[in-house]
Image (spheres, rainbow, N blue to C red):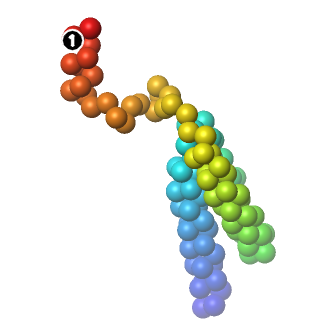
């Protein structure tokens, strides 16, 4: 029973870490950094999906927690240097009706 509970606990920790990393990656101000962080997180978890050794799994979780702390610091710094939004990100401040009004008058 303790073995099942330990596996469930590790799975819970891994899912929680995954969600935390994705949430934190969305905090980057720059599109490229934001997308890279999401892609890197998903790739790292996919790479180690089949990991069975408990010791190795715990080491990977500890490494992920360190990465989360680094990402938290990086997102704070990135918010100091906000740039204009890229075209691929879309424009938040422009409503669909106002963009048609601008093009009709111009």
5 and 34: which is toward the camera: 34
Q: How many marks?
A: 1
Q: Is 102 placed above or below 56 here?
A: above
* Quarter containing the N terminus: bottom right
Q: Is 17 placed above or below 85 here?
A: below
Outermost front residue: 80
Residue 35, quarter of the rendered image: top right
106 and 8: which is toward the camera: 106
- Can residue 20 be seen? yes
Residue in the picture at 63% in, 75% down? 10
Percent x, y for residue 50? Answer: 68, 61
Query: Pointer 1: residues within 10 angstroms few (<14), some, or many (20+)?
Result: few
Residue with the mark numbered 1:
104
Percent x, y for residue 48? Answer: 70, 58
Residue in the picture at 56% in, 73% down? 12
Secondary element type, mark 1: helix
- Can residue 49 be seen? no
Percent x, y for residue 3? Answer: 65, 86
Residue 61, quarter of the rendered image: bottom right
Residue in the picture at 60% in, 72% down? 13
Residue in the picture at 37% in, 36% down? 92
4 and 26: which is toward the camera: 26
Q: Is 22 placed above or below 78 here?
A: below
Percent x, y for residue 101? Answer: 21, 19
Outermost bottom residue: 1
């Amino acid at each position: 029973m303790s073995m099942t509970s330990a596996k469930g606990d590790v799975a819970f920790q891994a899912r929680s870490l995954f969600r935390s990393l994705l949430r934190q990656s969305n905090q980057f101000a720059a599109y490229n950094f934001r997308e890279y962080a999401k892609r890197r997180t998903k790739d790292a978890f996919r790479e180690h999906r089949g990991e069975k050794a408990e010791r190795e799994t715990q080491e990977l979780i500890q490494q992920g927690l360190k990465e989360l702390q680094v990402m938290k610091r990086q997102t704070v710094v990135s918010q100091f240097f906000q740039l204009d939004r890229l075209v691929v990100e879309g424009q938040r401040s422009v409503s669909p009706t106002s963009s048609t009004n601008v093009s009709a008058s111009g």
